Image: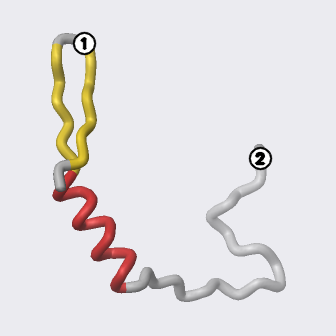
Amino acid sequence: MSKIYSEPSPGKQAENLEPKVETISFLLNYSKALSVINYKSMNFEAIIN
């Protein structure tokens, strides 16, 4: 595990990675619909649509 993953591999160029608008929209809508309920020592996750 001594390999440093933050440095690009030799011979490979760093790609400009940008998420699609659909991906961002999906994640934002999912996070708005997610409800976490804490009851005593338990967590309940519910998707509210």
Which secondary structure lies at badge 1?
loop
Callout 2: few (<14), some (14-19), or many (20+) C-alpha neighbours within 10 Å?
few
Residue at 82% from the left image edge and 78% from the top image edge: 10
* Residue 3, percent from left and from top: 77, 54
Q: Residue 12 sits in which quadrant?
A: bottom right
Which kind of residue does numbered mark 2 sit on?
Ser
Mark sitting on residue 41: 1
Mark sitting on residue 31: none
Callout 1: few (<14), some (14-19), or many (20+) C-alpha neighbours within 10 Å?
few
Q: Nearer the viewer, residue 10 or 40?
A: 40
Residue with the most extreme right position: 11
Which secondary structure lies at badge 2?
loop
Would you place residue 48 above or below residue 5 in this image?
above
Q: Name the residue that disc number 2 marks.
A: 2
For the image, the number of numbered tags is 2
Would you place residue 27 above or below residue 23 in this image?
above
* Residue 21, percent from left and from top: 34, 85
**Can you say which quadrant of the picture contains the N terminus?**
top right
Which kind of residue does numbered mark 1 sit on?
Ser
**Can you say which quadrant of the picture contains the C terminus?**
bottom left
* Residue 8, percent from left and from top: 70, 74
Residue at 64% from the left image edge and 84% from the top image edge: 14
Mark toward the start of the polypeptide (1 vs 2): 2
